[in-house]
Image: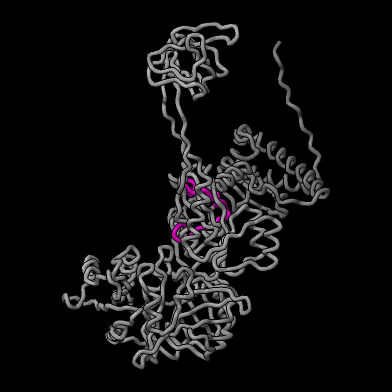
Amino acid sequence: MEKKSFKKKLTLSVSSSTKKRSDKIRYAKSQNKNSVIIEKKNIRSGFRKTNQQFSRDQVRSVTKTGKIFNKDLNLINKDSEKRKLAEQRATRRVKGQIVEEKVIKSKPLVKKREYKLTLSRALDEDNLGFKSRSLASIKRAKRKENIAISKDASLESDKSIIRNVDVPKVITIRELANRMAEQASSLIKHLLSMGVTATINHSIDADTAEYLIKEFGHNPIREEKIDIKIDKTSLSLGADLKKRAPIVTVMGHVDHGKTSLLDSIRDTDVVSGEHGGITQHIGAYQVNMNNEKITFIDTPGHAAFTEMRARGSKLTDIVVLVVAADDGVKPQTVEAIKHAKAAKVPIVVAISKCDLHEANPQNVKNQLLEHELIAEELSGETLFSEVSSKTKKNLDKIKENILLQAELLDLKADHKGKASGVILESKIDVGRGPISTVIIINGTLKKGDYFVSGSTWGKIRALINDKGATIEQAIPSTPVEILGMNGPAKAGDDFIVVENESKAKEINAYRKDNLQSEKSSLVFATQDSAFKDNKIKELNIIIKSDVQGSSEAIKTAILNIKNEEVLPKIIHSDIGLITETDVSLARASNAVLIAFNVKPSKEAKKMAEHNKIEIKYFNIIYEVLDFIKSNLSGMLKPSIEEQIIGSAEVMEIFKVSKFGKVAGSKVMVGEINQDSNARLIRDGNIVYTGKISSIYREKNTAKQVSAGLECGIILKDFADYKKKDIIEAYSVTTTERRI
């Protein structure tokens, strides 16, 4: 059955205003005009536009995107339908207004989706020919724009930013990472690849920090903080340059007569006060020769005092090399020559002990030729003197040679500037506190001056010369003891006078910070450390000495004792009396307590006796070294040597009711003894190690069976014999090892 299409008739009831509008539309159609006048209200934008005209072509173009159907356009061409269509449109428009007005009254206007194309917007002459974008299109465009912006931002962030990074002397990994704007973990990983195990709080030196900064693509800039240092070049600085006394260092092998020569020159007897007749401290003296002053520095000749000799050679102007005429050139003699040449100072040779019958000065001159020290009589430049401290032979000549060299050097210094110098020795006096011996290099040192020295500082409370007298000031080349330090100075440290107390504290704080940072600096892994045996035994040692130089020398000498199984470990080294703290530390660490030229306090002595802590007293350095070597030797495993006495081959196995299994054997080599050590070897492998319990020869016990004879052998706690087993008898020799 065919479907019938029904058209619903629309009956309009319009108001007077609407009727007027419809009349206008009919009049326009009757005049065959291609345009009509309608009233348009832009509801969404909240304003009204009236009497807008548009042509049929414009309507056609607009309706393609608006709410006018294409079938309505075809009806326009028919005059009979034009009027009806206009009425319908007018009616729809009116209804739409009414609805919109209700909505407007019920809800406030919200300017949403103004960009959406509507008929009213299309009829706006300002928007003719313009197609607006939809909300979805704008959202998509906005999303793409945001994505593009984020990509650009990421690309910019990916670009490496090159930074200028300040590099101090020592810096922690955390601080370096902050300055580089990098992750600390990245720096730690890079260090691990270099063989360095580190944490975020570890400190690294400037060179390592600079390397890391370059590896991460930044520019390192070294920081230069204010500090003050001196060297020998400062001798010539200043405006008030005047002649100064030469600084002469006496060097040579142990027991070659250095101190005795100085005693003869000074008319003193220092050598008698030295333990064992061996100088173990650096001494400084000033003497008058021909109305001119000369400063002498006496250095120890023992091998352990290498650093003292090196320190003396760097400070000196002239080196007096003492060589015994009966002993010739020795190891410390050669070492002294090397120190002097490294410091580029002239050498004056004093051939001592020329009063002895076995003296041979010419042999000494010949030996020194090998070291490029050529005497003047051999067309050389080195001044030689054959002297005797006992008979005072040629003492005047050695003085003349020193003054001649000093005149050639033309030594001058600034006498009015701030004082600077070098610490020769340091000690702690019970009544006066820390005391240091200083050689003034430049300027004048006065009572009340503020100074810094290494990691210490202070104010000069007193100046004491080499004769024990108190003086008010010390000019260049003068050796002097100073009181007023806040702690014991280190031998070899610089000594510098500063403007005031605040400046001294500032420099001291800076140096202490650097010292503390260096203690926690990183240690790079090496192959030797990676494969080092962690089972090495250690001997803990505590050293207390009278002066800093001796403590330093003992420490260096002990650490030079090397062994693969045992090592000395110095857990504490200081100067001054042995205190209760030292005894407590020795007890807690099970350490050897060494006292070098010092005694314990009453409280420390009582505490040591109560806790059974032995204090070892020494006054000669080689006795200390012998004691340490002896203790280390006692920690070594003894040397065990085995010697094969004889061997026997098992031929048969017998069962004896009383003894169990017996190995019927034939002695092949040597002899087999009862109770000797033995091992059983089967197919090249050691099956048993023990002792021979019994030996039988023709059913009788025997103590010994020689080669070629047969016997029965019973091994202790073993019965699993097999034919062709080899029984070896051997002896063990144990020997104590020494370092």
How far from the left and from the top, in percent, is residue 310?
A: 39, 69
Along the line of sight, the residue nearer the viewer: 377 or 245: 377
Q: Is residue 503 left or right of residue 309?
A: right
Along the line of sight, the residue nearer the viewer: 245 or 166: 245
Q: Look at the image and tell me in which quarter the N terminus lies.
A: top right
How far from the left and from the top, in percent, is residue 293?
A: 38, 89
Q: Is residue 198 magenta?
A: yes
Dividing the picture into quadrants, the one containing residue 255 is bottom left
How far from the left and from the top, in percent, is residue 493?
A: 48, 73
Along the line of sight, the residue nearer the viewer: 234 or 672: 672
Decide: is 37 above or below 490. above
Is residue 678 at all visible to an observer of this figure? yes
Q: Is residue 709 magenta?
A: no
- What residue span does the magenta drawing correspond to? 183-209
Q: Is residue 580 left or right of residue 320?
A: right
Q: Is residue 650 left or right of residue 146?
A: left
- The residue lying furthest to the bottom in this view is 291
Name the residue: 53% across, 46% down.
Answer: 634
Name the residue: 46% across, 7% down.
Answer: 652
Total marks placed? 0
Decide: is 390 above or below 527. below
Name the residue: 51% across, 9% down.
Answer: 699
How far from the left and from the top, in percent, is residue 282?
A: 45, 74
- The residue lying furthest to the right in this view is 106
Is residue 172 at all visible to an observer of this figure? no
